[in-house]
Image: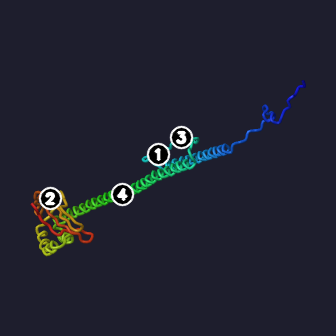
Amino acid sequence: MPSFRRRASVIDAGNGGDPQNPQEESVDPDEALRLAEEAEAEAAAAEARAAAARARAEAIRLRKQAEEAATAEVKAPEVDTAEADDADEPVETTEAAETTEAGDVVETTEKAAQTTEPVRRRRGWLKVAAAVLAIVLTLGFVGVSGYMVWEHGQAEKQRQLSAEYAAAARQSVVTLMSLDFNKAQEDVQRIIDNSAGQFREDFEAQAEDFVKVAKESKVVTEVNVNATAVKSMTETTATALVSATSRVTNAAGAKQEPRSWRLAIDLVREGDQIKMSKVEFVP
C-alpha cells in the first residue's frame, strides 16, 4: 500500500510550536504617565528643600544681627543651628514647605525686631538719664563749691571788718584818755578830729575849758588798753567794748595808782576813717 505523508498545512502552521523570533512587548501609557509624575514630584521636593535651606540660612543671619544688637541685660534668643544643617528633611509638598519656612522667617524677624527695639529704647533712656545725672551732679558740685567760696569770703570779710573796728576802738580810747598838759591843745584837737555826731559837737563846745583845766593842773595821763571786743557791727557802724587802765600824774609829782576802766564805744565810718560817735563808761 502506498504510504501517505502528511503535509504541513496552514492550520498546522498557525497552531504549531513556539515562534523562533518573538516580538517585543508593548509599553502601557498609564504606567509611563505615572513614572513621569513621580519624577516631577521628586524634582519639586528637591526644589522645596533647597528653598527651606535658604530660608533657614536667612533666619540664622537675622538672629545673629539681633544677638549683636542686644546688651547684657536683654539677651536675644539663641538660634537652633541644627535646623539649618538639616537640609534633607522631607517636605510633603512644595507649597506647604514654602509656607512653613516663610512663616519661620517672618516670626524670627518679628522677634528680632521686638528684642532690638526695647534694647535701643532702654539704651537711649540710660544715656539720657546718665547725661541728666552728670549735669545735676556737676551743678550740685559747682553750687556747693561756689557756696563754700562765698561763705569763706564772707567769713574772711567779717574777720577783717571786726579787726578794723577793734583797732579803731582801741585807738579811740587811747586818744580820748591820753593827755599831756604840755600839748593839751593838740590832744583836744585830736579828740575832735576822731569824733563824729553828737559826741563831737558836745566835746567841741567844752574844748577850751578842758584845755584850761589840763594846763592849770599840769595833768599827764597814760593809758594802756587791755582788751577789745566788737559787740555788734555793720558795714558802716559798730559797738565795741574796751577794757583799759590809766595812770595820772600832776605837777606836784603825785602819782595815782593805776585805775581800770570799761568803756562802750559807738563807732561810725566816715569815708575811709572810723570815728567814735558815743562814749559810755560802764561798771
Left or right: residue 1 versus residue 169 is right
Q: Which residue is mark 2?
A: 245
Q: Which residue is mark 1?
A: 77
Inter-mark Cα distance, 1 to 4: 38 Å
Left or right: residue 275 versus residue 116 is left
110 w.r.t. 240: above or below: above
Q: Residue at x 24, y 60 (%)?
A: 163
Inter-mark Cα distance, 4 to 2: 60 Å
Q: Earlier in the sequence, mark 3 or mark 1?
A: 1
Callout 4: SS:
helix
Q: Label 4 is placed on what type of residue?
A: Val
Q: How is the image coloured?
A: rainbow
Q: Which residue is mark 4?
A: 136
Q: Which residue is mark 3?
A: 82
- Figure quadrant of residue 2: top right
* Rendering coords of residue 198 (x, y %): 15, 73
Report the residue that reaches farthest toward the top: 1
Callout 2: SS:
strand
* Rendering coords of residue 194 (x, y %): 21, 69
Q: Residues within 10 Å of mark 2 (few under 14, many from 20)?
A: some
Residue 183 in view: no
- Figure quadrant of residue 207: bottom left
Q: Residue at x 59, y 45 (%)?
A: 49
The nearer-to-camera label among 1 and 4 is 1
Please report contact status of discs 4 and 2: CB closer than 8 Å, yes or no: no
Q: Nearer the viewer, residue 141 or 165?
A: 141
Callout 3: SS:
helix
